Image: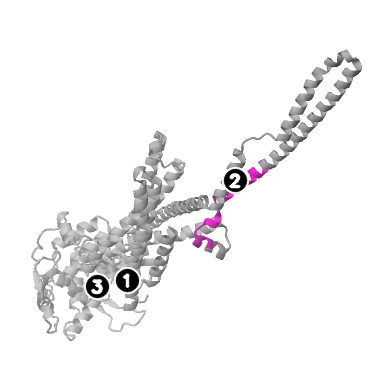
């Protein structure tokens, strides 16, 4: 795997972007659905949102671990799937 | 950090972490990775539970409407999924590679993949259904069906006229008797005319009713067709996520197959990261153990003390009369508290624990002080001098730090490029001699190796003597392989070949026996040694 500083920096930036995507596309819907369900608990909807928020956080953790291990190609793969997850969700 | 050996990833990572990261970096990394690992476990649990619970509850996710049976089903689903997720959580980070563990991992992974992929596909289907029901085409179709079925029943004017004419004709027929005074012929004429009118009116009524029935049948067919269309529009495959439609087009598969591929990508990546975090957590733990630390940053020796496996202070080590190498750095060969811990741990039968204990003990020996190391402070210069290592004039080396930490750094520096604790043991034995010889201009030869080897040999009190006896009786040849097997039979006789957990320790003991036998004048290296020939000659 590439261990050049540029790659390291790029992965760091992508990690921040991934965190932003996670907040925007995975956390916000969870919050909004929770607020919307305030007057009537929608267990299914809230749990569904929670699952994908946690899966998104797992991706972030995976990206962090891959960054730590300097594994660039798997890092890009997971980043791509995080984007797909965020857009799909 | 490169990883070229995919078959032994956790060990490889532990080795690389040991080489590239300091104990502090690993210690700081551990809780972060553990957080993400726990989050992953929570996500895996939630996804699997949603699927299993959904199946058992028949998609009835309204707790207020649950019956006792529903609550029992939810309870069982919680326990079952919780067990599977716990299996994932604990198996990924163990680093154990037995056949049973591989089987257990395969089971939990298959369950997790199956349930989580199904859950993701369910969610996608629900999204498609929602989007479809919100589409204008679907709404218009439903509206048309409602219009058709709810239209008020209207009586046709032509039918009403015909029915009125028929009624009038019937009245006239009944009134024809009024013409009786004018004769029978007149009555008959009246009846004939009015019966004709009645028949004509009834024929018109029938024609109109037939036409109405035909129209109604046609409307019903149209309505049914619209219902079918609405059913299709209620789950419109064109409403799938664009990524799924892309997969569908590229691979030429059905929508459900594309949804499966998509879900596999999402969940496969999730499960891979879950495993990666667990394996990395295990590797960090192993690397920290090689530094003599627990994942919580405590000294392993402190844990031994708490467990009653070790005394607080190491006992003084009497010099051995036959050992002329020992005094310079107080490297003794008598039983020590750490050795007691090592032996007790060894007897517990836990190979990792035994390896860790022996690593701890040897690390202490190599750094010139027996483990457990103390919490005294020192300077780098002072500790380097103790080890007779020249140090550059650098102010940094005058800084004060934990003496144990400095000793570990020196020990690590001596053995740069080493891996896990067990690997370090054997490699230290081999490389320690060269390293020290290089540093001291070749003045001292075999000292570190012999110190450690003799120490090990002496610590196997009785076993070394038995080996000497066996060699003298001809029960064991004084060669590497026979001696290795002889030791293995006595410390791990239930294990054979590559399944032996203590291979490194056995090799270490074999080298220690040979070094001590050479020192004791029982054995010598063959000066005429050639590849394939005898490396050692027994002279005892």
Q: Is residue B458 magenta?
A: no
Residue wearing tag 2: B144
| Distance between the alpha carbons at the discs numbered 3 and 1 | 52 Å
Where the C terminus of chain B falls, by quadrant?
bottom left
| Distance between the alpha carbons at the discs numbered 1 and 2 | 56 Å
Measuring from the top left, give residue B290's x and y in whole percent.
23, 66
Where the N terminus of chain B falls, by quadrant?
bottom left
Residues flagged by tags 2 and 3 on a common chain: yes
Measuring from the top left, give residue B426's x and y in whole percent.
26, 71
Residue wearing tag 3: B514
Between label 2 and label 3, give the one nearer the viewer.
2
Whether the residues at callouts 2 and 3 have beta carbons within 8 Å, the answer is no
Measuring from the top left, give residue B36's x and y in whole percent.
31, 59
What secondary structure predominates along the stretch shown in magenta? helix
Measuring from the top left, give residue B363's x and y in whole percent.
19, 69
Q: What element carries label 3?
A: helix
**Chain on which label 1 sits:** A
Q: Residue A12 carries which label?
A: 1
Q: Earlier in the sequence, mark 2 or mark 3?
A: 2
Closer to the camera in the image, B1 or B228: B228
Local crowd at mark 2 within 10 Å, few (<14), some, or many (≥20)? some
Which span of residues is magenta-colored? Answer: B220-245
| Distance between the alpha carbons at the discs numbered 2 and 3 | 96 Å
């Amino acid at each position: 795997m590439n261990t050049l500083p540029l790659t390291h920096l790029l992965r760091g930036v992508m990690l921040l972007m991934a965190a932003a995507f996670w907040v925007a596309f995975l956390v916000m819907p969870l919050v909004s659905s929770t607020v919307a369900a305030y007057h009537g608990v929608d267990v299914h909807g809230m749990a569904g949102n929670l699952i994908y928020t946690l899966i998104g956080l797992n991706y972030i953790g995976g990206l962090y671990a891959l960054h730590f291990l300097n594994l660039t190609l798997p890092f890009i793969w997971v980043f791509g799937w995080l984007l797909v997850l965020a857009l799909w969700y | 950090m490169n990883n070229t050996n995919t078959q032994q990833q956790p060990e490889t990572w532990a080795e690389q972490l040991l080489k590239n990261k300091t104990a502090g970096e690993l210690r700081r990394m551990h809780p972060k990775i553990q957080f993400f690992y726990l989050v992953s476990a929570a996500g895996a649990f939630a996804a699997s539970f949603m699927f299993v619970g959904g199946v058992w509850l028949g998609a009835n996710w309204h707790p207020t409407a649950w019956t006792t049976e529903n609550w029992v089903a939810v309870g069982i689903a919680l326990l079952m999924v919780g067990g599977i997720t716990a299996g994932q959580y604990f198996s990924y980070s163990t680093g154990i590679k037995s056949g049973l563990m591989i089987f257990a991992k395969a089971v939990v992974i298959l369950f997790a993949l199956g349930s989580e992929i199904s859950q993701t596909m369910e969610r996608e289907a629900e999204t498609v259904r929602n989007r479809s029901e919100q589409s204008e085409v679907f709404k218009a179709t439903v509206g048309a069906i409602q219009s058709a079925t709810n239209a008020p029943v209207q009586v046709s004017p032509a039918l009403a006229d015909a029915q009125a004419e028929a009624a009038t004709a019937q009245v006239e027929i009944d009134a024809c008797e009024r013409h009786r005074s004018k004769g029978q012929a007149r009555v008959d004429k009246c009846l004939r005319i009015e019966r004709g009118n009645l028949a004509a009116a009834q024929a018109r009524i029938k024609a109109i009713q037939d036409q109405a029935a035909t129209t109604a049948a046609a409307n019903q067919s149209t309505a049914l067709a619209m219902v079918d269309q609405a059913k299709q529009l209620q789950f419109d495959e064109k409403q799938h996520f664009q990524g799924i439609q892309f997969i569908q087009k590229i691979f030429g598969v059905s929508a459900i197959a594309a949804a499966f591929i998509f879900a596999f990508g999402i969940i496969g990546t999730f499960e891979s990261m879950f495993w990666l975090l667990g394996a990395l957590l295990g590797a960090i733990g192993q690397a920290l153990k090689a530094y003599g630390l627990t994942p919580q940053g405590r000294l392993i020796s402190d844990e031994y003390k708490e467990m009653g496996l070790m005394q607080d202070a190491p006992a003084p080590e009497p010099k051995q009369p036959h050992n002329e190498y020992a005094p310079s750095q107080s490297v003794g060969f008598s039983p020590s508290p750490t050795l007691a811990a090592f032996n007790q741990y060894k007897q517990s039968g836990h190979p990792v624990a035994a390896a860790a204990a022996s690593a701890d003990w040897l690390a202490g020996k190599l750094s010139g002080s027996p483990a457990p190391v103390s919490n005294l402070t020192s300077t780098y210069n002072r500790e380097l001098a103790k080890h007779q290592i020249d140090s550059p004039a650098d102010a940094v080396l005058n800084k004060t730090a934990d003496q144990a930490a400095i000793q570990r750094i020196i020990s690590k520096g001596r053995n740069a490029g080493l891996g896990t604790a067990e690997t370090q043991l054997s490699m230290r034995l081999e490389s320690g001699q060269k390293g020290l010889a290089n540093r001291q201009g070749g003045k001292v030869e075999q000292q570190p190796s012999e110190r450690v080897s003799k120490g090990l040999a002496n610590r196997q009190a009785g076993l070394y003597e038995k080996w000497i006896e066996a060699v003298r009786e001809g029960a064991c040849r004084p060669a590497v392989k026979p001696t290795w097997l002889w030791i293995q039979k006595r410390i791990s006789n239930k294990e054979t070949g590559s399944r032996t957990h203590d291979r490194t320790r056995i090799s270490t003991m074999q080298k220690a026996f040979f070094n001590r036998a050479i020192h004791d004048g029982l054995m010598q290296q063959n000066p005429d040694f050639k590849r394939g020939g005898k490396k050692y000659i027994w002279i005892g």
